[in-house]
Image (tube, rainbow, N blue to C red):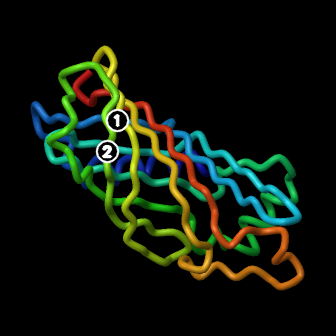
Amino acid sequence: MERLKLNVLTTILLVFLGVSSIGSQKYFTKNGEVSFTSQAPLEKIEAFNKSATSVLDIESGRMEFAILIKSFHFEKALMQEHFNENYMESSKFPKAIFKGKIQNLNEVKFEIDGKYPVQVGGDLTIHGETITITTDGTITVESDEISADSEFTVSVADFDISIPKVVRDNIAKEVVIKVDLTYQSLEQ
């Protein structure tokens, strides 16, 4: 069922960005890695997801990705269950979505191998709430392969995620999110 949802998300992203146009400069991944860390006074919680879907248009700088919330994996099964049922309500809000743009696109030379610092801004939707974020990242171009990574912090309260008082010292108010994407050309 989750594979079907991932395929639907992939199709939606591709259609949205107009992948059918010939000669487009679009890159795609369905194996992007996204992790988050909650470092609270009593407990460190980490989760990993290796099935983020993303499309990057190097002509316009548009960048989008979608992640199925239930695809995050935790060290402890009980943490994963509580995350999905009690906090993220992943049956009601099944995915996180980012729609944004590289703001300093003119500084990235996609035809020349190298690492390029970028600033990405856009809308991040989690748990049915959308906030505008701007974050720093890196675009790496190497032998016709493009990768992107970033690390940023979000506030749990910004996404209307309630944390019961009984576990308040176990869950941080701010969560560090790391994104690592390796793209393939859609022209291959």
Residue sitting at 29 percent across and 35 percent down? 27
Identify whether 121 is placed above or below 169. above
Q: In the visual, does 124 lie left or right of 165?
A: left
Task: Give the numbered dot on residue 118.
Answer: 2
Residue sitting at 24 percent across and 51 percent down? 62
Within-10-Å neighbours for mark 2: few <14, some 14–19, many 20+:
many
The quarter of the picture where residue 105 lies is: top left
The quadrant the C terminus occupies is top left
Q: Which of marks 2 and 1 is nearer the N terminus?
A: 2
Between 180 and 29, the residue placed more toward the observer is 180
Residue holding disc 1 = 139
Between 55 and 40, the residue placed more toward the observer is 40
Task: Give the numbered dot on residue 158.
Answer: none
Identify whether 59 is placed above or below 170. above
Q: Please state which amino acid type lies under the numbered disc 1.
A: Ile
Tell me the SS state at disc 2: strand
Residue sitting at 45 percent across and 37 percent down? 181
Q: Please state which amino acid type lies under the numbered disc 2.
A: Val
